Amino acid sequence: MSLTARITALSQAMAGDVKSINAVIGLLSALNTANKTSIVASINEVLALAQNASSSACASISDTTTETGKTWSSSKITDKLVALKAEILGGASSAYDTLLEIEQKLGSDDTALAGLLQAVGNRIAFDQAQSLTTAQKLQACNNLGVGDPETDFLAAYNTAKS
């Protein structure tokens, strides 16, 4: 291979690398910065703008308001999260204050879980039709303060009037 051919091959390989780099970096003219002389100069321009941003352009901290453009301090946010956790836990002991602990307790005691599922299954539904035994109807009505659903009111009336 001649020297000219070798230099031509080298220049073609280098041109391919430069094209690849330019494709990744992009064109300087496409930057939305005033300084388009280099990528470094453009990045420095953006950094300077960020460092010199006026306080009116940033959210201010206010623990007494929730208006747009303001944020709570980190300590207020932490306090709110602690209060939310306490509200969710509702005073649960440390043995049951995570979902993992509750899962482990329910998973380790199939009798308790079965009892819980049976209790949920024995509820009186107001969102769907149910078939209840006479005893179940009586208990439900007594719990609601309605009394015996099988009461014969006509017989009671006839008894009362005689």
Image (cartoon, rainbow, N blue to C red):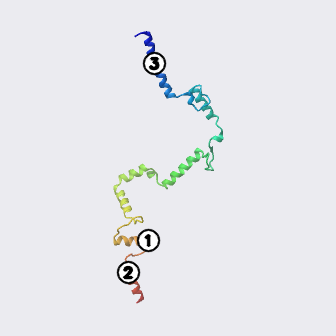
Label 3 vs label 2, nearer the camera: 3
Question: Residue 157: which numbered mark, if any?
Answer: none
Question: Residue 12: which numbered mark, if any?
Answer: 3
Q: Secondary structure at mark 2?
A: loop
Q: Earlier in the sequence, mark 1 or mark 3?
A: 3
Residue at left offset 39%, top offset 83%: 154
Identify the residue under disc 2.
152
Residue at left offset 42%, top offset 50%: 101
Amino acid residing under circle 1? Leu
Give the x, y percent position of residue 1. Answer: 40, 10
Residue at left offset 57%, top offset 28%: 29
Q: Secondary structure at mark 1?
A: helix
Q: Earlier in the sequence, mark 3 or mark 2?
A: 3
Q: Earlier in the sequence, mark 2 or mark 1?
A: 1
Give left or right: position of 133 versus 81. left
Q: Are marks 2 and 1 in contact (CB under 8 Å)?
A: no
Give left or right: position of 107 versus 79. left
Identify the residue under disc 1.
144
25 up-or-down from 13: above or below: below
Give left or right: position of 97 versus 52. left
Q: Are marks 3 and 2 in contact (CB under 8 Å)?
A: no
Amino acid residing under circle 2? Asp
